[in-house]
Image (cartoon, rainbow, N blue to C red):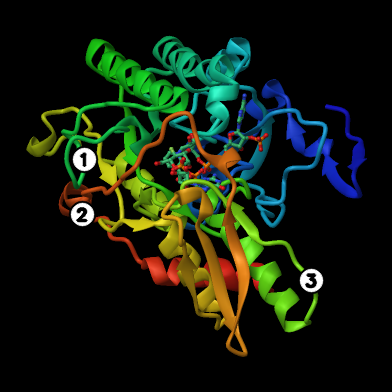
């Protein structure tokens, strides 16, 4: 532990606050402990907030070493029950030592190479991070803390080239990307270890979930950030470049990530003694049960700024599609297509059926599609 405060691009990471695993082990205080990997990301940071509010457990958030500041999503946390630990999924020793030393009651694995588009560029790294590391986590739990409850962040991308809609827990796994394949492989490993060693190891098929902590390369946040900057430019009569998107016809089932961390915790706390479970925890789909195109998201985002518009395409070809908003009855170009954002293979449609999670876990989504877009645009306008 260095104890130094290092400065990167004007922002600070207090390295004294990132514990090595032996120092972290002294902080458990005989209380229940939860390891959250990927705590700097959207879901990990929201889960930390949720557990600090809803439980009195000690939370260890796994962070990997980066040369740039990436703690924006957790910098607000000020609790003596929250500790950062050095953790890297690509290092099996790091995984094993974490489980061996902390002997956590819960291990929530949100860390991943989570950007589908990059998974073609870094297929092996995606596999290493999203599949091999899950095997390492399962082995560590089997060896050092077999009663630990493991949640693995599964994905609707595992359904991929879907056979029917809406997709439920029985839909076959038909991934379309190295990312989807890596999550499907992780799911199979989880199932095998659960059945072989009677571990409480599960994944959830979570459909897309978004919010103000969403990474800026994902399409929703890319849209809301750019829409906010275009709206500001229009208000000030300043020049701007249009937003560039790829396949705007793709359909996604979007929810608020805050609703999903509650679902994950419910999945981790199933009453497996209840006869409905036959002693084994179940895996569930979490979704909004609605699907929308990227086009609809764009329209809705500009509406939040009070701008209405229309998609225009005289040629009928997707790459010529353009979106104009009307300012004083003049059409102003705000969105155009850049084929560089097309993917080698696309998941055209995702629409989830979360009936089972609602019925058996009592889970409910609180935020509608319209409220989600409003929340994200308003945040990016502020
Ligand atoms: P995210 O914001 O991209 O966060 C990913 C996290 O993983 C970051 O904290 C990242 O750390 C960490 N990470 C990446 N590689 C790592 C490594 N080698 N060692 C340790 N940490 C590493 O993703 P998210 O949206 O919160 O998603 C959380 C999980 O749910 C992911 O597994 C994702 O695949 C899955 N999922 C997400 C959705 C969704 O719609 N959001 C849907 C289904 C499934 P850095 O900050 O250092 O990069
Ligand atoms: O926002 P996206 O990059 O998310 P994607 O690929 O659906 O993956 C997200 O959801 C999965 C769950 O289904 C998670 F497992 C995964 O970790 C991640 O959180 O893209 C959504 C759609 C795609 O069809 C994409 O082709 O938007 C389309 N799109 C169109 N233009 C674009 C763009 N996506 C991005 N990122 N950037 C564009 O310019």
Residue 213 visible from this viewpoint: no
Which percent across, then down, holds residue 49?
A: 55, 54
Which percent across, then down, holds residue 258?
A: 45, 57
Which residue is pictured at 7% across the width and 36% down the height? Answer: 275
Q: In this view, which residue lies farthest toward the left?
A: 275
Depth order, front residue of 115/47: 115
Which residue is pictured at 20% across the width and 54% down the height? Answer: 358
Contact (CB < 8 A) between labels 1 and 2? no
- For label 3, the residue is 239
Which residue is pictured at 73% across the width and 30% down the height? Answer: 19
- For label 2, the residue is 358
User: If you read the primary sequence from the N terminus, does the residue marked by circle 3 or circle 2 appear first?
Assistant: 3
Q: In which quarter of the image is the C terminus?
A: bottom right
Q: In which quarter of the image is the N terminus?
A: top right
- For label 1, the residue is 271
Tag 3's secondary structure?
loop
Asked if residue 299 lies left or right of residue 254, the reply is right
Distance, label 3 to label 1, CA atoms, is 58 Å
Q: Viewer-nearest of labels 1 and 2? A: 2
Q: Viewer-nearest of labels 3 and 2? A: 3
Which percent across, then down, holds residue 63?
A: 67, 33
């Amino acid at each position: 532990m260095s104890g130094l405060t290092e400065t990167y691009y004007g922002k600070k990471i207090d390295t004294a606050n990132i514990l090595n695993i032996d120092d972290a082990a002294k902080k458990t205080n005989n209380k229940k402990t939860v390891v959250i990997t990927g705590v700097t990301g959207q879901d990990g940071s929201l889960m930390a907030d949720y557990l600090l509010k809803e439980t009195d457990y000690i939370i260890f958030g796994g962070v990997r070493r980066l040369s740039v500041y990436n703690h924006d999503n957790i910098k607000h946390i000020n609790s003596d029950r929250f500790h950062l630990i050095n953790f890297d999924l690509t290092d099996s020793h790091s995984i094993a030592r974490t489980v061996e030393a902390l002997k956590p009651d819960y291990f929530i694995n949100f860390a991943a190479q989570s950007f589908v588009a990059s998974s073609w560029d870094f297929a092996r790294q995606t596999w290493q991070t999203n599949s091999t590391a899950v095997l390492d986590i399962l082995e560590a739990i089997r060896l050092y803390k077999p009663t630990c409850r493991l949640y693995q962040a599964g994905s609707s991308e595992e359904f991929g080239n879907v056979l029917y809609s809406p997709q439920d827990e029985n839909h076959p796994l038909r991934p379309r990307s190295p990312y989807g394949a890596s999550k499907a492989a992780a799911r199979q490993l989880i199932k095998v270890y659960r059945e072989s060693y009677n571990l409480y190891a599960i994944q959830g098929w979570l459909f897309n979930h978004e919010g103000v902590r969403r990474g800026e390369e994902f399409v929703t946040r890319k849209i809301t950030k750019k829409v906010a900057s275009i709206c500001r430019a229009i208000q000030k009569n300043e020049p701007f470049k249009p937003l560039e998107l790829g396949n705007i016809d793709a359909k996604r089932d979007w929810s608020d990530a805050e609703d999903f961390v509650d679902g994950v915790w419910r999945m981790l706390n199933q009453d497996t003694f209840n006869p409905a479970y036959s002693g084994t925890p179940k895996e569930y789909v979490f979704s909004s049960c609605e699907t929308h195109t990227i086009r609809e998201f764009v329209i809705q985002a500009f509406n939040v700024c009070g701008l209405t518009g229309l998609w225009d395409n005289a040629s009928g070809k997707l790459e010529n599609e353009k979106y104009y908003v009307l300012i004083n009855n003049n059409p102003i170009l705000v969105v155009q297509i850049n084929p560089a954002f097309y993917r080698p293979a696309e998941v055209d449609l995702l629409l989830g059926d979360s009936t089972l999670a609602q019925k058996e876990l009592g889970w409910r989504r609180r935020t509608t599609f319209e409220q989600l877009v409003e929340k994200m645009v308003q945040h990016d306008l502020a």
